[in-house]
Amino acid sequence: MRHKGTGYPGYALVAAAADAAVSVVDLRSFRLAGKIDVHAEPSTVLAQSGAGDALAITGSNGTLHLLDLNALTRRASFRVADDLAGGRLLPDGRHAVVISRASRQLLVVDLAARRVSQRFRLAGTPAGLDLAVADTGAVRVAVAMADQMPNAGTVEQFELQTGAHSRQYVSSSVGSLRYRRDAGLLFVANYDGRSITVLDGRSLSPVADLPLALRPEQLCFNADDGQLFVTGAGMDGIAIVFTYQPLIVEQTVLAGRAPGPMACSGEPEYLFVASKTSSEVSILSVLSRQVIAVVEAGQSPRQILMTPDNQYALILYAQSGALAVIRIPTITRNRSKSAAANRYKSAAALFTMIPVGDQPVGAAIASIG
């Protein structure tokens, strides 16, 4: 049953691969507002708060598509490479960084001019990408590569304003990587080493290597970036890493079966964790480190997003082609002692499920004025 809610003034944009389109969900009414055709399988969709435009990437043909969210149409499309493996919007909203595996390049794209403005050659095939703005205002982009040599990986960093470049070898294959918000540290998923490798955000010099009880596959910061949550194969749990001093794996907590995609709300601070093998979404209190609720949703989760007002959690499911919505203020802990195995069931049922298309692969939230 749907609980009362005011909705959120924005759209959820979903890359529906098999539909060759971006589905647009109006978060004020929680209805599908329409689909924007991109004529190829979209692999990534990017958006920023307050912008009337968004960006879709069709990785197989190396093309960027500018989307007009006011008219719900594709404004322009232009090709920048033979293929694209992912990207991020820069803070100015007028540029994007994308990576090409075929050419082993990092590209900075001027979206208004519809052309590549900078190219950086990479040491190997890119496997992960992140960016952050340092206290000095410098935009730093980090790229992880997994094929530099057998059982080894490489991380490269580029400072876009100056072109400064640094490189660090890691003694294992690497994948996901995330900057702390201030760009002071870079946290790298060291797959084979089962650890989080911490690098200095300016020089990429090694700072620490933090052993884990699992293979780090998903990385998620809490609201103030003081904690990094890690899930992956090898354990039905979440490793919690302190990202300031002391740099330690503070503890590992159990959180459902095969925990996968995660996202963290701000106030109240809840960590939402979707199971890769069941329909459960576990909700943990960041303060108490305990599972306070479990919600049944869907199968094969791809991504979890939070609306910026911390009112709604959105879970994207590949199997059903649907976006599940949980209204955060309705979450309360069920304190019944009768639940088997100390499991909790949320007093807040699923808010709604919205069909978004066939084979959704990723999503983004765009706020509107």
Image: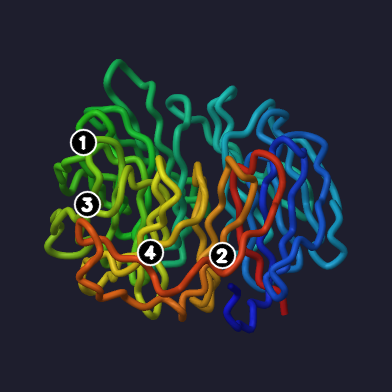
Mark in front: 2 vs 3:
2
Relative to 114, is 236 on the left or the right?
A: left
* Residue at the spot of label 1: 194
**How far, Cα to Cα, is label 3 from label 1?**
11 Å
Q: Is residue 164 visible?
A: no
Please state which amino acid type lies under the numbered disc 3: Ala
Mark in front: 1 vs 2:
2
Please state which amino acid type lies under the numbered disc 2: Val
**How far, Cα to Cα, is label 2 from label 3?**
26 Å
* Residue at the spot of label 4: 181
Query: Around disc 3, counting alpha carbons within 10 Å, would you say few (fewer than 14), some (14 to 19), or many (20 or more)?
Result: many
* Quadrant of the frame with the C terminus: bottom right
> Of residues 168 and 39, which is closer to you in this image?
39
**How far, Cα to Cα, is label 3 from label 4?**
20 Å
Q: Position of residue 254 (x, y in %)?
A: 21, 53
First in residue order: circle 3 vs circle 1: 1
Please state which amino acid type lies under the numbered disc 4: Arg
Local SS, label 2: strand
Instruction: Verify CB contact (< 8 Å) between mark 2 and mark 3.
Output: no
Q: Is residue 328 visible?
A: yes
> With respect to residue 126, does 51 lie above or below?
below
Residue 333: image quadrant is: bottom left
> Of residues 117 and 147, which is closer to you in this image?
147
* Residue at the spot of label 3: 239
**How far, Cα to Cα, is label 2 from label 4?**
27 Å
Q: Position of residue 183 (x, y in %)?
A: 36, 59
**How far, Cα to Cα, is label 1 from label 2?**
33 Å
Local SS, label 4: loop
Please state which amino acid type lies under the numbered disc 1: Arg
Residue displayed at 38% across by 27% down: 146
